[in-house]
Image (spheres, rainbow, N blue to C red):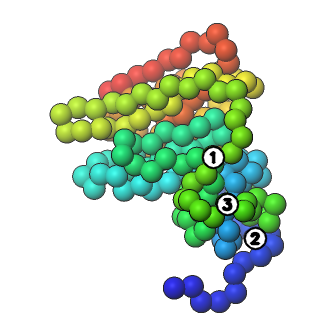
C-alpha cells in the first residue's frame, strides 16, 4: 500500500563503485509511471540487472536478467526486460565510476503502464543468445552479436559484466573480465570461455 505524495520532478542520489566485484547500486523507479531504461542509461551510464527469482536453488547470477542498450540476457523462464522500468520496480545499476550520482528525470517517464517491461524503437542490432546448462539445469545465458557504434573495448551502457564470476558459466571476454552482454564491431571475432 502506498502512502504519501507521488514523486514528480528530478531526483538524485549518490552511487559508488569501490573496486572489483562492487559498484552494484540498488535503485528503484521513484515515479508513479514507467521510465525508459535507455533514457535512464543515457543519463546514468552503466548496466542494469533485474531480480527474476527464476530458480530458488540457482546461483545468484542465474536469477538476474541483464539489460544494456544493446539488449538483454535472461535465464530461461525468467522475465525478460524490454526497455521499460515499471512503477516501483527495483533494479541494480552497475556503475563504472568510483563515485557518481544517479539521476531520475521527468523526461525519462513514459506513458505505457500496461506491462512490467516494454520495448522501444529498433536499432540495427544482430544478436544471438547462448544458454549453458547441465544435468542440474540452466546455469546462465549470454547475449553476443554486432551493433552499429559498438567497439571491441568496454562500451558503457552497452556491455554488461557478469555479477557472479566464480560459478560454472559461459561468458564473453574483454581481457580477463567476463561479460553477459557484449556486442562488437562488425567483422570482429568474439572470444568466449566456459568453466
Q: Nearer the viewer, mark 3 or mark 2?
A: 3
Q: Earlier in the sequence, mark 3 or mark 2?
A: 2
Query: Residue 16 placed where, x, y %?
Result: 63, 57
The image quarter in which residue 51 lies:
bottom left
**What is the CA distance from the residue labelled 3 to the residue labelled 2?**
21 Å
Residue 163 in the figure: left or right of residue 158 = left
Q: At numbered mark 3, what does the secondary structure look like: helix, strand or loop?
A: loop
Q: Which mark is residue 34?
A: none
| In front of the other: 169 or 143 | 143
Residue to which mark 3 is pinned: 112
Which residue occupies 63% across, 35% down? 70
Q: Earlier in the sequence, mark 2 or mark 1?
A: 2
Q: Residue furthest front?
A: 114
Residue to which mark 2 is pinned: 11
Which residue occupies 66% across, 40% down? 69
Q: Is residue 73 above or below residue 192?
A: below
Which residue occupies 61% across, 58% down? 85
Residue 191 in the figure: left or right of residue 140 = right
Amino acid at each position: 500500500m502506498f502512502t504519501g505524495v507521488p514523486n514528480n520532478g528530478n531526483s538524485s542520489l549518490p552511487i559508488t563503485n569501490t573496486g572489483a566485484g562492487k559498484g552494484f547500486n540498488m535503485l528503484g523507479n521513484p515515479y508513479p509511471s514507467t521510465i525508459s531504461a535507455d533514457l535512464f542509461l543515457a543519463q546514468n551510464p552503466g548496466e542494469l540487472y533485474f531480480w527474476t527469482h527464476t530458480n530458488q536453488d540457482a546461483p545468484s547470477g542465474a536469477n538476474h536478467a541483464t539489460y544494456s542498450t544493446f539488449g538483454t540476457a535472461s535465464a530461461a523462464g525468467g522475465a525478460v526486460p524490454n526497455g521499460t522500468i515499471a512503477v516501483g520496480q527495483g533494479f541494480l545499476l552497475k556503475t563504472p565510476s568510483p563515485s557518481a550520482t544517479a539521476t531520475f528525470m521527468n523526461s525519462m517517464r513514459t506513458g505505457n503502464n500496461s506491462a512490467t517491461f516494454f520495448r522501444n524503437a529498433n536499432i540495427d542490432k544482430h544478436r544471438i543468445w547462448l544458454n549453458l546448462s547441465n544435468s542440474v539445469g540452466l546455469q546462465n545465458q549470454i547475449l553476443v552479436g554486432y551493433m552499429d557504434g559498438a567497439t571491441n573495448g568496454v562500451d558503457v551502457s552497452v556491455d554488461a559484466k557478469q555479477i557472479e564470476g566464480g560459478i560454472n558459466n559461459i561468458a564473453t571476454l574483454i581481457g580477463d573480465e567476463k561479460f553477459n552482454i557484449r556486442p562488437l564491431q562488425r567483422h570482429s571475432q568474439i572470444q568466449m570461455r566456459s568453466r
